[in-house]
Image: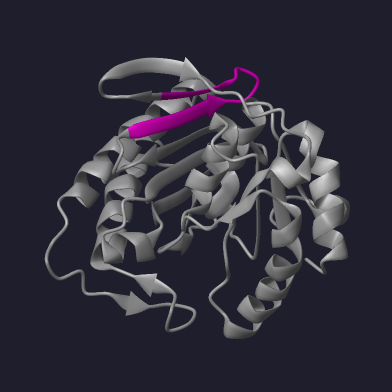
């Protein structure tokens, strides 16, 4: 079966739009429950949107491996792996805050080559193919290329972040935040890792950092950010996804990295 990155992106975009259509039919009762902790929410719509995506992948790419937030890993030995987050920003969705997304990425041989993050409330689609740049488009306008900022001064940088669900981890993250906040322009906590990474790509944030994410959280967003010129790595040279991940424009990355390390981020 073909593994052309542009074809994989087309599948991802089609399924992201189908899942977004499902999410827009928000019922009055979301049957919200909890996963890892009482604050780690999941709704019936997470599962419905994921079913739409998984059914579509089963029809289009029946032999591929799928790693999905709600359904887990099907553990297939396949060249192509899909990373699926059907509703990134579940708590925002639960409270009616318009900051949540569908995120789908395709990796070939362990390398993410295509990714889409669809901002459901704004109907904005962020997309990238490895080596071809990143774009953003919507229903009323065409595709526009994305480029991260060039702001290299931490004191003038707008920085996004997120917090884990475990109380002890949050306490440690709060200590890092308290140390970092006086040294940057300001901090934003928007509630969707995928959209935060896309905000770096679009120049809406100068940087973003967060700890404890899963591959479905960052697979599409990191490709989009990198294709827009951002540098995305773990702290102290760790691979992305291990410990704290930092995404920033290249002029800012090292200086913000050192501030985070000095603040005790790990």
Location of residue 265 by image quarter: bottom right
* Location of residue 262 in the rendering, given as x and y in whole percent from the top left corner: 87, 63
* Location of residue 203 in the rendering, given as x and y in whole percent from the top left corner: 58, 32
* Location of residue 171 in the rendering, given as x and y in whole percent from the top left corner: 65, 80
Q: Quadrant of the C terminus?
A: bottom right
Q: Residue at the spot x=82%, y=66% of the render?
A: 263
Q: Which is nearer the eye, 157 or 8?
A: 157
* Location of residue 241 in the rendering, given as x and y in whole percent from the top left corner: 69, 55
Query: Principal SS element in the magenta part?
Result: strand
Q: Is residue 21 left or right of residue 255?
A: left
Residue 80 visible, this orientation:
no
Vertical relation: 5 (above or below) 244: above
Display coloring: one colour
Q: Is residue 180 magenta?
A: no
Q: Is residue 26 left or right of residue 92?
A: left
Vertical relation: 151 (above or below) 163: above
Q: Residue at the spot x=85%, y=43% of the render?
A: 254
The number of discs equals 0
Q: Residue at the spot x=38%, y=46% of the render?
A: 102
Q: Is residue 154 left or right of residue 170?
A: right
Vertical relation: 217 (above or below) 202: below
Q: Residue at the spot x=30%, y=35% of the render?
A: 123
Q: Which is nearer the eye, 251 or 220?
A: 251
Q: Which residues are magenta?
A: 124-136
Q: Is residue 133 magenta?
A: yes
Residue 194 visible, this orientation:
yes
């Amino acid at each position: 079966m073909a593994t052309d990155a542009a074809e994989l992106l087309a599948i991802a975009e089609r399924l992201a739009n189908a899942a977004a259509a499902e999410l827009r039919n928000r019922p009055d009762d979301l049957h919200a429950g909890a996963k890892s902790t009482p604050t780690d929410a999941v709704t019936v719509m997470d599962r419905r949107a994921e079913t739409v995506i998984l059914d579509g992948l089963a029809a289009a790419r029946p032999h591929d491996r799928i790693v999905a937030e709600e359904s887990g890993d099907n553990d297939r030995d396949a060249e192509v792996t899909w990373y699926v987050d059907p509703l990134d920003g579940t708590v925002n969705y639960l409270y009616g805050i318009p900051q949540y997304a569908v995120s789908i990425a395709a990796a070939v041989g362990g390398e993410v080559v295509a990714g889409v993050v669809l901002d459901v409330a704004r109907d904005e689609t962020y997309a990238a193919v490895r080596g071809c740049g990143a774009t953003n488009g919507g229903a009323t306008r065409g595709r526009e290329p994305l480029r991260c900022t060039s702001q290299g001064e931490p004191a003038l940088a707008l920085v996004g972040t997120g917090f884990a669900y475990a109380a002890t981890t949050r306490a440690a993250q709060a200590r890092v935040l308290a140390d970092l906040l006086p040294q940057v322009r300001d901090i934003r906590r928007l509630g969707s890792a995928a959209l935060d990474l896309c905000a770096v790509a679009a120049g809406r944030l100068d940087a973003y950092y967060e700890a404890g994410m899963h591959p479905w959280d960052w697979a599409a967003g990191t490709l989009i950010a990198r294709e827009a010129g951002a540098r995305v790595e773990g702290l102290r040279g760790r691979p992305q996804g291990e410990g704290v991940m930092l995404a920033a424009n290249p002029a800012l990355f090292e200086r913000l990295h050192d501030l985070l390390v000095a603040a005790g981020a790990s």
